[in-house]
Amino acid sequence: MKGSFAKRITLFVLTNLAVVAMLAIVGQLIGVENLLARRGVGLNLPGLLIMAAVMGFGGAIFSLLISKPMAKWSTGAQVITSPRSEDERWLVETVHRLARDAGIGMPDVAIYDSPDMNAFATGARRNSALVAVSTGLLHGMKRDEVEAVLGHEVAHVANGDMVTLTLLQGVLNTFVIFLSRVVGFFVDRFLSRSEDGEESGGSGPAYFITSVVLQIVFGIGASMIVAWYSRRREFRADDGGAQLVDPGAMARALNRLRMQQGEPAMLPSNMQAFGIRGGGMMALFSSHPPLELRIQRLMDGSWKR
């Protein structure tokens, strides 16, 4: 749902960046990058690319592997092992039925205490995932709407969104690290030329500064690509919720989220021209499409195309 997948992606990316930063610092301390750069005017591109791939995919894969425990820890979600109420029993049975319909293994089902209407799904494997809902969603929506939300989350698992996101993030990390260091290498070489045209060996402060600055700049560009991918996957998950449950229930659940978040409910068609819609550069970094667009797709049947 809106916000939940955004929080998971934010946590995933931040963990990713932390691991990549740690690996970069270790590489600097043990002199790996100096070794690669200390090649006269040349550059060991294959070696640098291998190092970038190890660092880039290392952070992404590590983030994926710890996604379930991190999600449970960060939200306080409690896995339902033995239902203690009718709501918990219905929740477990509904998630398991939707998982069977989607052709995936039975995920763990959890509840976390929050007034916010939300839900999330995560996990490194589609047959060993976690689906969790907030108490606010469980008690604030009608059962057919909750079921549609659960279908949306199960669709995320069935579509393998977290694994695909990991691969995408790993590739982007690799190119961010690789390109920032290649440019840093040549900037450092240019600035370190002596008056007689000779270059000093090793890498200087210009290499480090340029690499760090460009890694931030390229990282921002990479986050825009991740956000674009996330918006596409949200549409796919909405389609999955519509197929597994009902498009009307999925649309009503999304509209209820709009009202909870202080946004106006869907305007009648003759009034939509007078509505105010957000936009601008921040839309490029949004992990979710606008709620009104998601609702409209479900209402007019265009999600089937």
Image: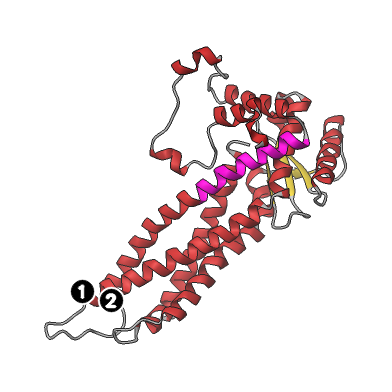
Disc 1 crowd, CA 10 A, few/some/many (<14, 14-19, 20+):
some
Q: In this orientation, which residue lies closer to the viewer: 219 or 29? A: 219
- Which residue is painted at 49% across and 41% down in the image? 286
SS majority, magenta: helix
The quarter holding residue 127 reads: bottom right
Residue at image coords 39%, 35%? 280
Instruction: Determine which of the numbered discs, if any, sits on residue 191 in the image.
Output: 1
Name the residue located 61 percent from the left edge and 30 percent from the top edge. Answer: 297
| Magenta region | 226-244
Residue 237 belongs to magenta span: yes
Question: Which amino acid lies under the numbered mark 2 shown in the image of this protein?
Answer: Gly
Q: Foreground residue, 16 or 220?
A: 220
Name the amino acid type tagged 1.
Answer: Leu
Residue 99 vs 221, above or below: the answer is: above
Given contact means CB atoms under 8 Å apart, are the residues at marks 1 and 2 in contact? yes
Residue placed under numbered mark 2 in the picture: 204
Q: Is residue 289 left or right of residue 148?
A: left
Q: Position of residue 202 (x, y in %)?
A: 31, 83
Q: Is residue 286 above or below residue 30?
A: above
Q: Secondary structure at mark 2?
A: loop
